[in-house]
Image (spheres, coloured by chain):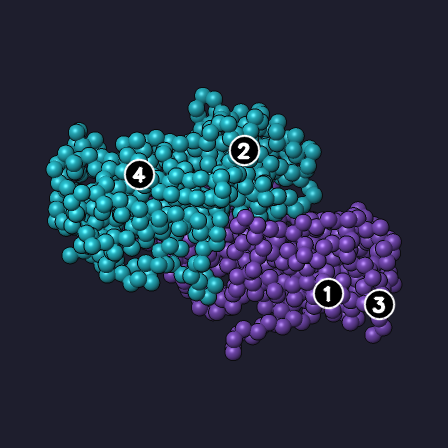
Chain colours: A cyan, B purple
């Protein structure tokens, strides 16, 4: 495969995570080290930065600040939720991207995101191929939802899971401190896949956690839920329940639907408020003290409780994407292939973007308890290796020291 | 002062904190080491454990498990919110306490709690003196609200403040990740004193934090609030606002009042839901994307983000209470006297329970900005030394390892 010399663009898209900047770091470091890549640019706010010609010259950043990226939450380049049209219907955006790529001699494009971003990435890849402009396009996986097809797990998931499980252990102790009885409902992100809500089971596995866990993989039944809570409350004097924001009735309606009507850029209903709603229902039924807790943004940006394994794998994914592209690959997403037999091992592989785009990987039903409100040991065995290790994050005055990039515009 | 031999009872009361068990640890270790104290008992659920004759024999616990208490959140003995009658009106409870104290030859009583608990402690102290039964009663301070009179600060406050500031730094990065504009409101505990909400300013001091902070020390004006948010939103495209749950209008009504009507054991309105309510008001006014986040229980039980200084001082407070009682003192609460001139120094002192009970210490108005939605450097200088140090907490599989006491009933 002939060497391809030119600049590269790295962009971050979709909801941020605690480790997406580690992927940015991994890709940037590999790109800066590559002889084929002449310039390393970061696009502001995902693909919108390319369309708007707002590219930052990463080559001018201080090495130490790039190191800080590994422990800095959220998408440091900025993110977007921008739906690209089908190029066969409307190629305006794609023509503009081509124009910008030509302007900066961009021959490598790395898009770091989830399902929707891989779809965008796939469309750009196919358009470039069709247009005859040689540009190697690679997807770098990212999502706390852990719902990307074709990979053992997704960078970002484990750190969110670790924060959720740790917080559930702490809340479980706090919520049961009085002898007067109470029911606590904690709401966890995950629209269609319950990977994050299921992570609360790790807290119970460690000795302090939720009694019941409700996932979107199975239909929710309010009467069953109330009966289970009432049983616990009468037996133990307290109940601690973890619910996925995406739990739905058999007819598909989200339990939280009534709470909000606004939608994000992709037309997904924006969920939330479910914990308080369920707590109120319990209060009406049992007349007991209740509390609804929503982990909200905290669960996806808590870098202070991140998994070092997750950080290292996120950096590895970015690095692997660059190395594969430089070696001639294009149109793939980096994925993880893991073995847990003799200790945990994680290797990267490549899967076609087309096969990833817009699929959602859910928890295998056989990992969910017959009671439909618990998970089995198989899930714990899957999750445990992913959350290992405490990051050596930089602190100043015992507070986080986040990366501060100069973000000088590309010339 | 003659030596007083007998058993001691340690009890935990009021809302739990991330470090109240460190005070329990400090008191228990000192009591177990004392030649005067024959038995060390822990009361289940505060004073209710004494009334109900449910005492645990701490002398039978494993040393290592007691060590784990320093990094274990919530009140491991259980807590209560139990209002004692005025002994002159109704001495039933006090007679019962005397009976139990006589049964176990209890000569030392240590009550670890906040304002209401110090009131309980004071009443018990005065009743014992009046009844002629020699029992030394000491209060150990505890409250994330930091509103106890006569002490530089309260054990529990700094760890909550550190978690709040750290989380605000992370959320600030996440909430500003899109270029589409948004307003985020984060709700922080603190009914009448704004110490915790003000701690969010430490995040801004560190480079990423709220733009506006609203405290209960000053009256809240909805129009001023909306104008300030609109100005920021138009200038920067985003606004991040921290509010104390206790903010109120000039006429005294809590802004969150409409949201809930239930009350706790002391007749305080149970607040919450304020962040979502304010976010909705902003959305109606500006029509922008909004998000309301409530830190809820997380902020008072997040031992994974505790301050080592706070943990050590909490243990010191427990130890000092025992040592003072053994040396003959009674009717006092342990307090902190700190100097910040040449480095930070913290010493314990004793203040009469009567002077503490039911007072609430608020943020000095001169530490609050003229704009009434910020705090001055004086507050940062006050807070910074208190949050220093990361606890060497025990981990198993990268998850917290909390104390597991046997809790064998006293004979």
Q: Distance between the residues labelled 1 and 4?
A: 61 Å
Outermost residue, bottom side:
B342
In contact (CB < 8 Å): disc 2 and disc 1: no
Q: How far apart are marks 2 and 1 (CA)?
A: 44 Å
Residue lying at 52% horizontally and 75% vertically, measured from the top left: B343
Which of labels 2 and 3 is toward the front?
2
Quadrant location of the N terminus of chain A in the rendered image:
top left
CA distance for labels 3 and 1 = 15 Å
Q: Is residue B39 depicted above or below A316 in this figure? A: below
Please name whichever residue, B308 or A4, is drawn nearer the observer in this view of the structure.
A4
- Frontmost residue, A4 versus B25: A4
- Identify the subunit bearing mark 4: A
**Co-location on one chain, circles 2 and 3:** no
Whether the residues at callouts 4 and 2 have beta carbons within 8 Å, the answer is no
Q: Which mark is residue B4?
A: 3
Query: Label 1 belongs to which residue?
Result: B30
Q: Given the image, what chain letter belongs to the residue carrying mark 3?
A: B
B156 up-or-down from A203: above or below: below
The front one of A302 and B374 is A302
The Cα–Cα distance between marks 4 and 2, rounded to whole angstroms, is 30 Å
Quadrant hosting residue A145: top left
User: Which of the two labelled residues, at mark 3 and mark 1, occupies the earlier sequence position?
Assistant: 3
Q: Is residue A250 visible?
A: yes
What chain is tagged by disc 1?
B
Tag 1 and tag 4, C-beta contact below 8 Å: no
Question: Which one is closest to the eye, mark 4 or mark 2?
Answer: 4
Q: Which mark lies nearer to you, 1 or 4?
A: 4
Query: What's the mark number on residue A400?
Result: none
Residue displayed at 52% across by 44% down: A165
């Amino acid at each position: 495969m002939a060497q391809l010399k030119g600049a590269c663009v790295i962009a971050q898209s979709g909801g941020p995570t605690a480790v997406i900047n580690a992927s940015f770091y991994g890709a940037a470091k590999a790109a800066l080290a590559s002889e084929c890549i002449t310039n390393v640019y970061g696009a502001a706010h995902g693909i919108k930065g390319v369309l708007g010609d707002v590219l930052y010259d990463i080559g001018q950043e201080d090495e130490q600040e790039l190191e800080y990226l590994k422990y800095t939450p959220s998408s440091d380049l900025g993110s977007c939720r921008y739906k690209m049209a089908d190029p066969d219907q409307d190629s305006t955006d794609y023509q503009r991207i081509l124009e910008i790529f030509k302007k900066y001699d961009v021959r490598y494009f790395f898009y770091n995101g989830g399902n929707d971003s891989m779809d965008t990435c796939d469309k750009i890849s196919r358009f470039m191929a069709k247009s005859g402009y040689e540009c190697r396009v690679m997807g770098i996986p990212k999502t706390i939802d852990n719902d990307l097809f074709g990979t053992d797990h997704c960078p970002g998931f484990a750190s969110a899971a670790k924060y959720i499980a740790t917080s559930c252990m702490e809340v479980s102790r706090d919520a049961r401190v009085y002898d007067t009885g109470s029911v606590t409902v904690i709401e966890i992100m995950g629209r269609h896949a319950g990977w994050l809500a299921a992570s609360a089971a790790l807290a119970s596995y460690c000795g302090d956690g939720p009694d019941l866990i409700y996932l979107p993989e199975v239909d929710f039944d309010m009467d069953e839920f109330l009966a289970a809570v009432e049983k616990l409350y009468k037996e133990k004097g307290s109940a601690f329940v973890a619910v996925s924001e995406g739990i739905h009735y058999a007819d598909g309606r989200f339990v939280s639907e009534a709470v909000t009507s606004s939608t994000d850029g992709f037309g997904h209903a924006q969920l939330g408020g479910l914990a308080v709603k369920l707590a109120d229902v319990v209060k009406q039924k049992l007349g007991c003290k209740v509390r609804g807790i929503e982990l909200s943004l905290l669960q996806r940006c808590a870098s202070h409780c991140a998994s070092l394994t997750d950080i290292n794998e996120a950096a590895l994914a970015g690095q692997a994407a660059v190395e594969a592209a430089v070696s001639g690959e294009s149109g793939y997403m980096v994925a993880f292939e893991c073995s847990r037999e003799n200790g945990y091992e994680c290797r990267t592989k490549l899967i076609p973007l087309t096969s990833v785009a817009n699929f959602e990987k859910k928890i295998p039903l056989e990992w969910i308890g017959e009671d439909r409100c618990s998970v089995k040991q198989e899930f714990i065995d899957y999750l445990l290796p992913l959350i290992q290790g405490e990051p050596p994050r930089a602190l100043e005055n015992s507070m986080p020291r986040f990366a501060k990039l100069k973000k000088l515009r590309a010339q």
